[in-house]
Amino acid sequence: MRRIPSLLVMLALAASATATHAAPGNELYMVVNARNPIQGLAMRDAVALYTGRVHTFPDGREAEAFDQSDTGGTRASFYRALTGMDLARINSYWARLRFSGQVQPPRSLGDDKDMLAMVKSNPRAIGYLRTAPADASVRVVLVLADAAE
């Protein structure tokens, strides 16, 4: 009986992993500060950071995950690409965790411009952008396919 949930999780992760190969223009870019030693991030590590299961990068350094605002659709696209869940389910997930007092969701910022400014100024920050950054002060650690495309 316990194998079925494990199998479902493995299938979901496999589907997510294959979704990282998107046509040009349909990607979302997870970024960190260029001073962060992390060169890349596995999908499972990104999911753990953005679901509040961990608050550190894989190397043990403290991480601060940031979200974009609900407007514009980038946040919905990000969570759909990362977890396979729509924004209503993600909001419900965070509401349950907040109610239990266990953990707080990532702090919400405005848009790509605000996210880029935060990641540039905070070596512990991780965020996501709709467009590929041209700024050398941030590093792309994971590219996700926008599942809506």
Image: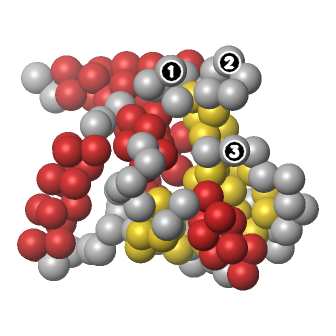
Q: Residue furthest right?
A: 136
* Coloring scheme used: secondary structure
Residue at the disc numbered 2? 23
Q: Do the residues labelled 1 and 2 touch (CB within 8 Å)?
A: yes
Quarter of the figure with residue 3 = top left
- Amino acid, disc 1: Glu
In primary-sequence order, the first of circles 1 and 2 is 2
- How far is disc 1 from disc 2 in space, using C-alphas? 9 Å
User: Residue 20 in the image: x percent, y percent?
Assistant: 60, 27
Above or below, 62 relative to 6: below
- Amino acid, disc 3: Thr
Q: Dot 3: few (<14), some (14–19), or many (≥20) neighbours within 10 Å? A: few
Q: Which residue is drawn at the image coordinates 50% and 21% (left, top)?
A: 149
Residue at the disc numbered 3? 131
Above or below, 50 relative to 64: above
Residue at the disc numbered 1? 149
